[in-house]
Image (spheres, rainbow, N blue to C red):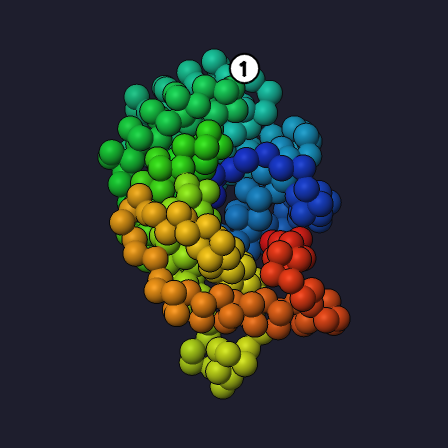
Amino acid sequence: MEVTFALQRLAGYKPRTTQKSKDTLDTGVALLEHGAYASKGEAGWDAVEKLALAALDQGNIEVADKCLRIISDKFPDSPRTHVLTGIRLEATESPEAVLRFYDELLEEDSSNSAIWRRRAHVFRQTGKLDRAVDELSAMLDTFYTEVDGWLELADIYLSCQQYTYALQSLTHALLLSPQNPSHFLLFAETAYLAEDVPLSLKMYLQVVDMTDDDDGDMAPSDSIPAGITLRAWLGVKLCTQKLITEPRAASSTSQTPAPTTSNLSALDNLSTERLRTAYLDIKHESPPAGDVELIAALATLVK
C-alpha cells in the first residue's frame, strides 16, 4: 500500500467495534507472534497497521502497542508513525494531551494534512463542532485537493442539518473526484434533504448514468439495479413522487429546472419499473402495487 493511501486511511480512522475488526484482530495476532509480516514487504507493514487499528477498535491496547512499536522501528519519525501514535493516544489519553501532541507535530511539519484531520476528529468527538469545522477549513485552505477532507466537512454540516453548507463542501469533492458515483449519490441525498428536489433528481440521474453498464452485453433497461444504482433509482422515484404530488417542490434554490410534465411522468414510470424489477430479484415475490408501499419496501432493502 502506498504511504499516501496509508496516511489517508489513518486520517479518517474512527473507532468501530465491528465483527470485521474482531476477525482482523483474531487472525492478525498469529501473524504478529510469528513475525510473518517482515517477509511480506509493504503488504506486511500494512497488515500490522490494520491490526493496530483493529486492536484499538476492540480495546486491546497491548496488541496495539506491539504493532505501534513495530511500525515505529520500521518507519521512525515518519508521518505514518506520528499519526498512528496519535490515534493510539486518542484511545487512552485526555483530548487536551492528544491535541498538545498533534500541535507539536504541526509545529515541526505543518504539511502533514492527516494531523489536521486527526485534530478535527478530536474536536468533533468532544462536541466542539465549530472547532472541528475551523480545523478542517484551515486545512483545506492549504490542501485543497484533499477530497476526504471535504467529505468530512460535509459530514459535520450534515450532522448539524446545515444542508446548504454540506452541499457547498460536496461541490468541491465532485470537482476533485468527478468519476466517483458515491460522491454524486451523497450530493443527491443531501440536496433532497435541503428540499432542492430538482437538483436532487438531476444528481440521482447522474448516478444512474455513471453506474449503469452501457458497455455490457445487456441493455440497461434489461438489467437488474443493485447497490448504488438501486439507491439512485429509489432517489429518482422519491423525487418524481415529490414533484408530482407537491408542485411547490419544483422550486429550486440552485435554479435547477424541474422536468416537463411529460418527462416527469416518463421518469416516474421508468423508476417504478426499475424498482419493481429490483424488488422481484431480491425478494422473489411480487412487488407492492402502490408507489408508497414500493418505496417503503425498497427503503428497508437498500444499503
Left or right, 294 with reference to 177: right
- Tell me if I can see residue 291 in this picture: yes
**Residue closest to the far left:** 142
Position of residue 107 relative to residue 244, above or below, is above
Left or right, 45 with reference to 285: left
Position of residue 4 relative to residue 270, above or below, is above
Q: Residue at x 44, y 47 (%)?
A: 192
**Number of callouts in the render?**
1
- Tell me if I can see residue 239 in this picture: no
Q: Position of residue 179 (x, y in %)?
A: 36, 61
Residue sitting nearer the eye, 274 or 87: 274
Amino acid at pointer 1: Ser
**Residue closest to the far bottom:** 217
Q: Position of residue 42 (x, y in %)?
A: 48, 52
Left or right, 105 with reference to 69: left
Disc 1 on helix, strand or loop? loop
Residue sitting nearer the eye, 277 or 26: 277
Q: Position of residue 174 (x, y in %)?
A: 33, 52
Residue sitting nearer the eye, 10 or 52: 10
Q: Residue at x 41, y 32 (%)?
A: 162
Position of residue 222 relative to residue 116, above or below, is below
Q: Residue at x 48, y 82 (%)?
A: 219
Left or right, 153 with reference to 279: left
- Residue under pointer 1: 94
Q: Residue at x 48, y 25 (%)?
A: 124
Q: Position of residue 23 (x, y in %)?
A: 71, 47
> Which of the 4 image quadrants contains residue 83?
top left
Quadrant housing the C terminus: bottom right
How many neighbours does mark 1 have within 10 angstroms: few (below 14), some (14-19), or many (20 or more)? few
> Which of the 4 image quadrants contains residue 139?
top left
